[in-house]
């Protein structure tokens, strides 16, 4: 029996608003690395609407079979097969990208993995390259909604290493790796899209 494609309702809900942020950023031909492609729904949607971009999905090995089903069904000429990528690995399995995109990963990763992700992105990007990070965040210890408080508590009950990351901590980490916060967009469902730019 053939494997059923995984499905995320959250991906379906947020792919349109995220694409609206990406389109004015990704106007030139380049390779975009997606860290944590999950089901592959975002990869397929963004590659279809950004035909001048080469989209490079990646994730841990356990998630790749599901994402491959979406990517192979879409059969897009500007979509690469998903790469296995563990952000804690050194070196990464990809050494060059014009931009990096990641959604709903920072609160799932343990903090050492978040550190490793920013370090890897800092190594990967050339000056002017962007790192687009989507998800829920805290601001100077404060939450943007009651639902985010509940979500954070839920994450930490399941795994104390998980949890919503604070923008202050991410900003300090980013600066250590040559990344400066360019924009912070409020998104539906109490999420944000943070855009970091690799400085010269």
Image: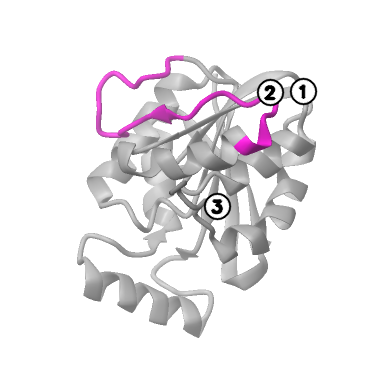
CB-based contact (under 8 Å), mark 2 and mark 3: no
Give the overall secondary structure of the magenta segment. loop
Question: Does the magenta-highlighted stretch encompass residue 75?
Answer: yes
Q: Which residue is mark 2?
A: 78
CB-based contact (under 8 Å), mark 2 and mark 1: yes
Is the residue 79 above or below the residue 46 in the image? above
Q: CA distance from mark 2 to mark 1?
A: 7 Å
Q: Residue furthest left?
A: 160
Q: Which residue is mark 3?
A: 134
Q: Which residue is mark 1?
A: 52
Q: CA distance from mark 1 to mark 3?
A: 22 Å
Which quarter of the figure has residue 59? top left
- The mark lying in front, picked from 2 and 3, is 2
Question: Under tag 1, what secondary structure?
Answer: loop
Q: Residue at x 44, y 66 (%)?
A: 138
Q: Which of the two labelled residues, at mark 2 and mark 1, occupies the earlier sequence position?
A: 1
Q: Residue at x 26, y 50 (%)?
A: 111
The magenta stretch spans which residues? 73-95
Q: Which of the two labelled residues, at mark 1 and mark 3, occupies the earlier sequence position?
A: 1
Q: Residue at x 58, y 42 (%)?
A: 70
Q: Residue at x 69, y 34 (%)?
A: 47
Q: Which of the two labelled residues, at mark 2 and mark 3, occupies the earlier sequence position?
A: 2
Q: Report whether 125 appears left or right of 187.
A: left
Residue 15, percent from left and from top: 67, 54
Residue 160, percent from left and from top: 20, 66
Q: Is residue 28 visible?
A: yes
Question: Does the magenta-highlighted stretch encompass residue 197?
Answer: no
Question: Under tag 2, what secondary structure?
Answer: loop
Is the residue 108 above or below the residue 63 in the image? below
């Amino acid at each position: 029996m053939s494997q059923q494609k995984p499905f995320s309702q959250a991906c379906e809900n947020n792919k349109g608003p995220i694409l609206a942020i990406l389109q004015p950023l990704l106007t030139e031909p380049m390779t975009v690395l997606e860290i944590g492609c999950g089901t592959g729904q975002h990869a397929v949607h963004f590659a279809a609407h950004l035909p001048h971009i080469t989209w490079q999905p990646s994730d841990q090995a356990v998630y790749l079979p599901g994402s491959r089903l979406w990517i192979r069904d879409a059969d897009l000429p500007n979509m690469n097969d998903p790469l296995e990528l563990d952000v804690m690995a050194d070196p990464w399995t990809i050494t060059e990208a014009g931009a990096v995109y990641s959604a709903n990963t920072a609160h799932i990763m343990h903090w050492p993995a978040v550190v490793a992700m920013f370090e890897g992105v800092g190594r990967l990007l050339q000056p002017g390259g962007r790192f687009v990070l989507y998800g829920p965040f805290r601001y100077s210890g404060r939450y943007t909604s009651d639902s985010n408080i509940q979500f954070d508590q839920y994450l930490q009950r399941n795994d104390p290493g998980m949890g919503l990351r604070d923008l202050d901590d991410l900003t300090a980490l980013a600066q250590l790796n040559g990344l400066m916060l360019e924009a912070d967009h409020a998104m539906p469902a109490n999420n944000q899209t943070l855009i970091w730019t690799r400085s010269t």
